[in-house]
Amino acid sequence: MTQNLFELFTDDPVEYNLQHLKTQLFMVLITLIRQKSWNQATAAQHLNVTTPRMSNLFKGHLDKFSIDALLQMLVRIGYKLDADFDPENKAQPLVMNLKKAML
């Protein structure tokens, strides 16, 4: 059985991994926005994007967003993506964690 939806649509490991990362960033961003009880207009203002752009995000139109754009919004909401690299750890050499940014 397939573990991820994108495996059904592509055999390209690069495309698969990019779409998987984009989906994870989207889910985290939407969760953080909802935790703050922001509506689309308020979220757009805080994240420095237009209301139609925020509407696209809320509707899950991920094709309209780059990974960079999602990361920028995460930073604007007060978080950062931290990557730790351990070349000795063969099973998981790169670990990424979302952390609250120090303001």
Image: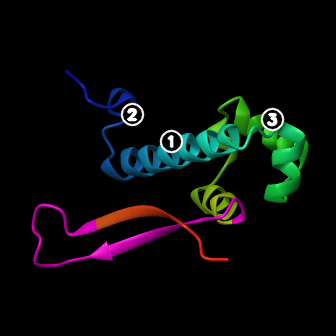
46, above or below 23, in the image:
below
* Helix, strand or loop at mark 3: helix
- Residue 21, how many percent across, how many down? 45, 50
Quadrant the N terminus occupies: top left
97, above or below 31, in the image:
below
User: Which label number is shown at residue 23?
Assistant: 1
Q: Which residues are magenta?
A: 76-94
Q: Residue at x 67, y 64 (%)?
A: 72
Closer to us: mark 2 or mark 1?
A: 1
The CA span between labels 1 and 3 is: 16 Å
The crowding category of the residue bearing disc 3, from other C-alpha atoms within 10 Å (few below 14, some 14 to 19, many at least 20), is some
Check disc 2 and give the amino acid type.
Phe
Q: Residue tagged by mark 2?
A: 6
- Residue 81, how many percent across, how many down? 49, 66
The CA span between labels 2 and 1 is: 10 Å
* Helix, strand or loop at mark 2: helix
- Mark sitting earlier along the chain (2/3): 2
The crowding category of the residue bearing disc 1, from other C-alpha atoms within 10 Å (few below 14, some 14 to 19, many at least 20), is some
